[in-house]
Amino acid sequence: MPHRKLTKSAITADRRTRARYRKERRFKLYCIGALSLAVAFLVVFFTSLIGQGWSAFQQAEVLVEVSYNEQSVELPLAAVGEDARPLVSRGFYRLIPRQVEQNPELMDTTKEQWVLAKADVDQYLKGKKARLRANEKKTVDRLVEEGRARLAFNTGFFTNGDSKLPEMAGIYSAAVGSIYVLALTLAFSFPVGVMSAVYLEEFAPDNRFTQGIEININNLAAVPSILFGLLGLAIFINFFHVPRSSPLVGGLTLALMTLPVVIISTRAALRAVPDTIRQGALAMGITRWQAVRDHVLPLSLPGILTGTIIGLAQAMGETAPLIIVGMIAFIPDAPGSVTEAATVLPAQIFTWAGMPQRAFVERTAAGILVLVAVLIAMNALAVYLRRRFERRW
Amino acid sequence: MRAMKKLAIAATAAAAFGLATSAQARDQIRIVGSSTVYPFSSYVAEEFGATTGHSTPVVESTGSGGGMKLFCEGNGLNTPDITNASRPMKLREFEMCQENGVTGITEAVVGYDGIAIAHNIDNPPTNLTREQITLAVAAEVPQGGKLVKNPYKNWSDIDSSLPDKEILVLGPPTTSGTRDAFEELVMEAGSENIDGYGGEYTKIRQDGVYVPSGENDNLIVQKLAQNKDAFGIFGYSFLEENSDRIRAAEIDGIAPTPEAISSGEYPVSRSLFFYIKHSHVDKVPGVMDYANLFMSERMISPLGYLKGLGLIPLPKETRVMYREQVKNLKKLEPGDLKEH
Amino acid sequence: MTGPVRARPGPVLSVFGTVAELWDNSLNSQAPPGAVDTVTTMALSFSPFSFEGPWSVDVATTITAFLLGMLPIAYASFLLARRWATRTEAAGVAIHSRPGQYGWYGVMWVALPALVVALIAAFIQLFGLGTIPGPLLVAAALTVGAGGIWFARATLRPGLRARNILDRVIRWVLLAAALVSILTTFGIVISILFESIRFFEMVSFWHFITGTEWAPDTGFMGDAADADPKFGSVPLFAGTFMITAVAMLVAVPVGLLSAIYMSEYATRAVRGMAKPTLEVLAGIPTVVYGFFAAIVVAPAVVDAAGFVGLDASYQSALASGLVMGVMIIPFISSLSDDVINSVPQSLREGAYALGTTQSETIKQVILPAALPGIISATLLAISRALGETMIVVMAAGLRPNLTWNPLEDMTTVTVRIVDVLTGDQAFDSPETLSAFALGLVLFVITLCLNLVSTVMVRRFRQKYE
């Protein structure tokens, strides 16, 4: 509780008392200092990330004439005029043969269109170090003057999967993989977790066995995440033969990690419901299970949901167990089912952080921004749920 | 009753979900293996996925040894189709494959990787012999007729013709295949020529003069930029990517250029391989198309895309030979092993 | 009034018969592609392989077929039982439970036996005691399920206490769910124990625990002259403890003082803003912290050290430790916050009554009272820091280094585990197995820390309740 300031009086005339008040102020300053250190870190953190990452949301494009004809299907490089040729991304060139195949009316036409420029052009336009030859730089400058080169919003970042070409790299497949993994984590950990908590809270007799289970759950909550990875490798992949790198094995491993969180928060939510409700229900003659199902659970649902969302947010940011289970790989396509190989957003960030091309640094930072934004949104949702639906008994 | 309906719907949804997963046999090619071949393999995989109708192959960097283990586990569809390696398959691994039923294997060589020792570009060009490098990083050196803990702290301690700078070498960790190659091609060859070792010596010192650095090459470059005396050991592809910041030293008088590596003149080079599992060729669509794409001129010739990523191309006749080998799925025999 | 109730197998058998017929058709005939394509895939997939093999084709298909078959049978059982109950009640006989509950009783007798059969088959399959072809399993499970309908119907009578039986069954199901967590712990222990035992057959346990040299690379070249790999793990644990110590030096003061400020000094508004801010720190994924440590903090440390004339590595323990400390701040601050708040108000008021300032109350009354809780929070935080992986993988070094200097690069246990399991070396080398041995020791250490921490909290709570 805040202390009301004492007015100057005989008390403060004493030297020792003044010294004590000084100590008091100093202590308070230390505490504020500590808190501000933490806040300052956050400020530095976000500023540096945003500073490094915001440029990734823009991508360089050049306006060129593209000729679709026999020659360009054979040698896609021939589709663009000579001076702009080295500036266009390889990702555009390799799509030309298929484009013509799928849209035959394109054959023998020329179109002026905005196409993706290669990563070095992109970095050059953003003012960063780029490996362009002198004549290429001149061409780019000329195109900028003519208005034929621009930095457009990088939609590819959100619609493309991983790529070896930095200008084509995006988070789409990682995001889809994350969604699959989260869905599976939820599907496995929510029912089992809630059922365990209901058992422990409502049905379990108070004996050694139950205490053992409780201690065990508290322990699991604090086991290093990498050991869950070893568990996933040894048991799910080697014993159950679940496909490596699939959302299934990732979801199962993360579900086991999230289980203690769900159990603990569900128990807290169940405990918050007053006993009178249970007793009233039992007084009507229904069984214990019916009382829980129809009276206690609905009332504790907001608390349970809050805990689950927080647990899921933690799972979404986990990388270490997924490395051991094989989800660090080059996986550009989004998974079509739970048994296909997939990667998740934090794993994608980890992979990009190790790529040598400098253009990936800004993409890593941008990916981090997206991930952190999603996590903050999830936590905010959980807090909102808690505030809105919390009942004071 | 309402609960029963809800349960029925949920179970049907689960069943449909399960059906969706089960109805497809695997159509994603699975590739594992060496972290050195990984950048090339994933580039080809991406090309493959983007230019054909197949889904993009999944490439995992497990290391050559780990990749061999997964590859040789059996013929099931949960094992990989192709494994990359920065060294040829060992006899032990070949036997494991045979034991587990993987009897049809095709070996392909895609190119060379040179291992370079580089330093900050501001330094003048340096020439080191393999013996000097061995003495710089070995854990023990022969002095006075026996092996003692390596006392050399400066390059000039080893050889007075070398500059008087502190020895600091950033190299691959023990879990990297590049280290294996470095030990074999530099230290074994170097220590053989030094009397006092009495043979090959490959143990590397751990007192801070040799610093194991991982896959994050950006950090290594930062260090080299900061410490002008330091040397880094990496693959040629990395040298290419950072040629504006680092310069390679000559080894035994020969600089690591593509021509020198390709002709075998540059002593520290190794071949890069991948192995195809015959039993998967029919079961997983596109395996041969991917392999043939990898071996095509578009990729591995001197004008190919992988050259730009740092792959040193094979001489033309060798390329043609391996291309044919892959196309015809020539079976790997025990006699073909360790011949490179 | 209540004559013997006769089960009516007619509709049940016919349903089962239709399913069997459909199955037969798909197995024998050339099913045209399209809608029946999936059934064909299922049927064809059963022939070359058995239960084992490509997961995505076989096991998932079997599970799907199982569920699809179970659903109508269970539903049929539900309807039958409930209809009996409604009719009996309408006929004037008093039944014990509600009709719906009799319906669930019927479902129970279908689902549970079928599940037991499936589980037994899975066990046999997984432990390699035999192979069970998919169709046989599904057929067996469904037959048992159908038999369940008959059995349930046969045992239905007005006096049947369906409600209570259901209650007990549900209790068991919930208990089974609670046992999953025990199974998880078993799983973790088993997965590291077996491989660790194999490792300790190759390397002596004593040498592992007390040796000060970690040099596995001579084990790499199988036929090198000096093949004497050293697996002394002391440098690895020293690295872990050093980084943890740095992290604690950052986290404990900042976390504790922040907690004190938020619980004792702050107004409701400030507390409302400060708490979420600290929770944001907890929500940032560790891979992001790792990236930040490697790209921003490590160069800053090198520059700062160079400024005072010291030589720091780009992979210094200091950089990783600092960032790890920041990551742990929310742990300590929120746990300490709870502990400080639960110190009874009477203690505070007694101290104020004696004329102490707030800081004196905190330092001399509240903190000593809350000390066990705070220590327990610190132990939990230490255990978290010991097991942290991503920050050190991205920002710490790879060289086992036994030193007191935090500016040098050193590697930790968790970095080694990741490195070894994703590295290039031979698959059955002692180096790969060392990962599991390290994991085992890590598990034991964190387990002990957690136990001590829990015991302390319990004793602290007992004192004040």
Image: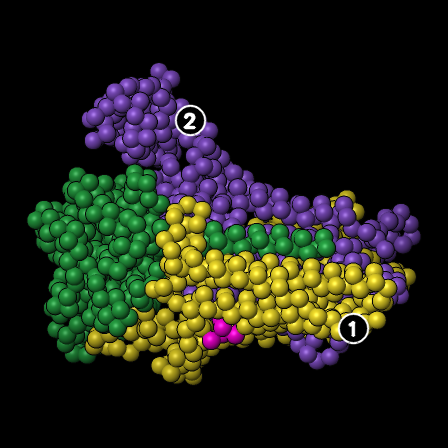
Chain colours: A purple, B green, C yellow
Secondary structure mostly seen in magenta is: helix
| Residue at horizontal 17 percent and vertical 67 percent from the top | B188
Q: Residue furthest left?
A: B317
On the same chain, marks 1 and 2? The answer is no
User: How far, Cα to Cα, is label 1 from label 2?
Assistant: 86 Å
Kind of residue at disc 2: Leu
| Residue at horizontal 43 percent and vertical 78 percent from the top | C129
Residue A5 appears at what percent x and percent y? Answer: 86, 48
Magenta segment boundaries in residue numbering = C119-124
Residue B134 appears at what percent x and percent y? Answer: 20, 65
Q: Which mark is nearer the camera, 1 or 2? A: 1
Residue A32 appears at what percent x and percent y? Answer: 70, 50
Q: Is residue B109 left or right of residue C185?
A: left
Residue B335 visible to the viewer:
yes
Residue C262 appears at what percent x and percent y? Answer: 74, 52
Kind of residue at disc 1: Gly
Residue placed under numbered mark 1 in the picture: C3
Marked residue chain, label 2? A
Q: Is residue C285 left or right of residue C203?
A: right
- In the rendered image, which quarter contains the C terminus of chain A? bottom right
Closer to us: A291 or B50? A291
Label 2 environment density (alpha carbons within 10 Å; few <14, some 14–19, many ≥20): some
Above or below, A362 against A102 in this view is below
Residue placed under numbered mark 2 in the picture: A151
Q: Secondary structure at mark 2?
A: strand
Q: Is residue C131 left or right of residue A98?
A: right
**Count of numbered circles on the image:** 2
